Image: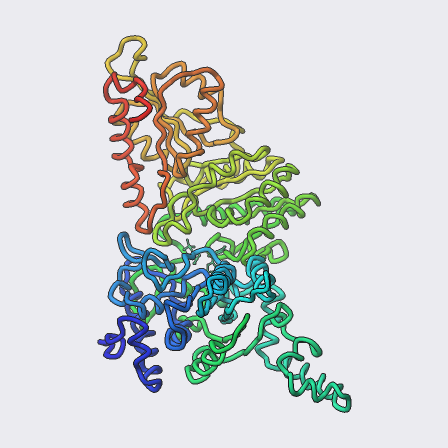
């Protein structure tokens, strides 16, 4: 297909020049183009949500004066059609690839990407800020937040509604919230809000409430008042929708695939002042039968596939992923211990909890996109003697930092945090990278931090954490490890103990050898490239396993017997595991040179993990290079000058 109409659209200005009658055709081409591009992509991307927002995107850019009017897309995983219509049509093929465009909106990518996203439920706050800024600056423009029903479940979305629906400082922003209700999150949606939205969609709730109220008022002076000021009274006299109670003018639900409904409704809403709310109903995967039938599977496409047959998500992939290790451990542990409760903030599939959900439905809790609640909910369960395991991506635990400290750690409650997607995650890029959890969790009193090196150690580390009577994080990366055999038996690791995996045959420099005797202290899965580098350099290599409690005795022992240390971790260097080693050495009075390897103090873009790790010098060759550069010759053992 050569997309004759789509090829003429290089910006929304081109779109607005089209007669309205052409828009349906354009939407058809846009949908086909997204599907065609993603099915030919090596990297894949978020498919279902993008197919579902085609008409909405066309209508928004048609009606609103973008980028002067601000569109803020929640999560941003549904912005592929938006990217195509805003000058990035040809670049769509590079989406999520190394050096290509991002899978999420980025302010530095386009003026049409008004707000960077990736994590959910931020759009109403940001759009409210933009609308308020326009008021303060006296500018006449609109801000629009487009948020999905899944993302709407987060507390933050309601904090924003609560703030945006009433004037403050005498000012009320001109903003529109569009609830894109496809009755799906990544997994099927959960919670009371979902049930409420279903009732709104059934159409009976609002109309019967309104009719009921009218008949009650019929012969009273209030009836005429109510009739003439119906909009006002539906919030005041009859029970309005929850969104009206927040101060928004609620319109909908309308069909989000019907341009003849969308365009006039958006035109009306654009003309209105103050907080507006439009409820649109869409279908995840719209227009692609396979995705419509299985929106969970088609949330994201894994790479190239034939649209005619779809893709297969292999039940038995070549290598066991860390996520699978966790999922199997969870089921095994749950079988042994009835107190175990598994919690996920809306990431059942990604966290490997599908089987646990099937086998232990009463002990499985998907709390929606509500990381803060997930953590404090776990704290409550732990108070009552249950054993909560919170399965959460490292990046999403950032949302619940205060809950981690204040609700869990301060009360020393035994909650296990299974931190998936630790370190770089690849195609999702900087928003989803789990680079900070070591640094932010090790500074919390009572917390323990475990960094298993491979699949088997991950299983054993989870078991160890589960036996511990205080909060613990066990972190592991996206995808598979080196492929070691996984023992069915669960054996607790020696608490706070590392293990020497390779011993250098070099003598001490202090005993006048030619090159320094180096100890590489590795935290997590980088142990394996570290072992390769250690082999080349004849260095000692240690699998530290625990960032906290750190094996101080082992560190002291190594410091006495080596000339230099190298620390390695797949987390940020700043404040990370290497810093923990430095602190321990300082406290114990050792003055050894230390090279800290890990992720630099910058955001790492999307790309395949192997290339990114190599660019960060964290593959075997890079580790070797860095060590040689720093310690290859005797003089480099001297500390570099402060300004070097
Ligand atoms: C804070 C946060 N938690 C979890 C996620 C993972 N996540 C991305 S999209 C998504 C589902 C969002 O559902 P919805 O907003 O309804 O959009 P849809 O996928 O249905 O289009 C989830 C859970 C995230 N991006 N951010
Ligand atoms: C948009 C979003 O946050 C998720 O869909 C995320 O991309 C999932 O990542 P994984 O593929 O690592 O589960
Ligand atoms: Mg949804």
Can I make out residue 578 in this image? yes
* 477 displayed left or right of 610: right
Spot occupied by residue 210 in the image (x, y as percentages of width and height)? 67, 83
| Residue 157 picture location, percent across and down | 55, 61
Q: Nearer the viewer, residue 593 or 533?
A: 593
Residue 559 in the image: state x and y as whole percent: 40, 17
Position of residue 524 relative to residue 641, above or below, is below
- The part of the image, by quadrant, that contains residue 484 is top left
Residue 358, visible in the rendered structure: no
- Total numbered labels: 0
Q: Quadrant of the N terminus?
A: bottom left
Residue at 63% from the left image edge and 57% from the top image edge? 362
User: Would residue 172 be found to the left or right of residue 519 on screen?
Assistant: right
Residue 620, relative to residue 117: is it above or below?
A: above
Q: Residue at x 51, y 54 (%)?
A: 353
Pick out the residue farthest to the top: 511
How far across and down, in percent of the image, does residue 290 sit? 39, 72
Decide which of 268, 431 is in the foreground and name it: 268
């Amino acid at each position: 297909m050569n997309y004759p109409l789509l090829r003429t659209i290089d910006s929304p200005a081109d779109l607005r020049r089209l007669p309205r009658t052409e828009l349906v055709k354009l939407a058809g081409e846009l949908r086909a183009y997204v599907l065609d591009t993603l099915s030919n992509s090596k990297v894949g991307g978020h498919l279902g949500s993008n197919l579902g927002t085609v008409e909405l995107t066309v209508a928004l850019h048609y009606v609103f004066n973008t980028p002067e009017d601000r569109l803020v897309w929640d999560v941003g995983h549904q912005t592929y059609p938006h990217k195509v219509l805003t000058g990035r049509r040809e670049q769509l093929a590079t989406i999520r690839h190394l050096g290509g465009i991002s899978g999420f909106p980025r302010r530095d990518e386009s003026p049409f990407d008004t707000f960077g996203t990736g994590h959910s439920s931020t759009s109403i706050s940001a759009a409210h800020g933009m609308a308020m800024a326009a008021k303060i600056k006296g500018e006449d423009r609109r801000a629009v937040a487009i948020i999905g029903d899944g993302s709407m479940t987060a507390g933050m979305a309601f904090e924003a509604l609560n703030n945006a629906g009433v004037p403050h400082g005498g000012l009320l922003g001109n903003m529109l919230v569009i609830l894109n209700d496809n009755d799906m999150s990544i997994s099927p949606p959960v919670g009371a809000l979902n049930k409420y939205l279903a009732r709104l969609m059934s159409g009976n709730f609002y109309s019967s409430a309104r009719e009921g109220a009218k008949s009650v008022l019929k012969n009273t002076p209030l009836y005429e008042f109510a009739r003439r000021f119906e909009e006002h009274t539906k919030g005041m006299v009859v029970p309005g929708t929850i969104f009206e109670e927040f101060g928004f003018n609620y319109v909908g639900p309308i069909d989000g695939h019907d341009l003849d409904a969308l365009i006039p409704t958006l035109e009306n809403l654009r003309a209105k002042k103050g907080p507006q709310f439009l409820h649109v109903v869409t279908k995840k995967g719209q227009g692609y039968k396979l995705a419509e039938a299985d929106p969970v599977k088609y949330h994201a496409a894994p790479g190239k596939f034939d649209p005619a047959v779809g893709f297969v998500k292999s039940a038995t992939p070549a290598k066991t992923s860390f996520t699978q290790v966790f999922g199997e451990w969870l089921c095994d542990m749950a079988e042994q211990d009835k107190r175990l409760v598994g919690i996920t903030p809306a990431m059942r599939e990604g966290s490997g909890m599908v089987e646990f959900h099937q086998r232990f439905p009463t002990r499985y809790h998907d709390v929606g996109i509500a990381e803060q609640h997930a953590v404090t909910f776990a704290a409550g369960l732990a108070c009552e003697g249950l054993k909560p395991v919170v399965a959460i991506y490292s990046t999403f635990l950032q949302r619940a930092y205060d809950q981690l400290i204040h609700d869990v750690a301060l009360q020393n409650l035994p909650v296990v945090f299974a931190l998936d997607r630790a370190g770089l995650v690849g195609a999702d890029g900087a928003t989803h990278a789990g680079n900070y959890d070591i640094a932010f969790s090790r500074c919390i009193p009572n917390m323990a931090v475990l960094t298993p090196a491979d699949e088997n150690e991950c299983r054993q580390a989870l078991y160890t954490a589960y036996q511990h009577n205080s909060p613990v994080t066990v972190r592991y990366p996206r995808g598979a490890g080196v492929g070691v055999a996984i023992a069915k038996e669960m054996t607790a690791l020696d608490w706070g103990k590392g293990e020497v995996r390779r011993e250098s045959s070099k003598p001490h420099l202090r005993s006048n050898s030619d090159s320094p005797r180096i100890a590489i202290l590795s935290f997590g899965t980088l142990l394996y490239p570290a072992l390769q580098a250690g082999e080349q350099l004849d260095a000692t290599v240690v699998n530290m396993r625990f960032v906290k409690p750190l094996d101080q005795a082992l560190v002291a022992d190594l410091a006495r017997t080596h000339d230099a240390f190298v620390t390695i971790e797949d987390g940020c260097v700043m404040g990370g595991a290497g810093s923990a080693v430095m602190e321990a050495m300082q406290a114990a009075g050792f003055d050894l040179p230390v090279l800290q390897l890990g992720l630099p103090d910058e955001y790492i873009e999307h790309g395949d993990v192997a290339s990114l790790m190599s660019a960060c010098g964290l593959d075997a060759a890079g580790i070797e290079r860095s060590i040689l550069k720093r310690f290859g010759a005797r003089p480099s053992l001297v500390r570099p000058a402060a300004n070097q």
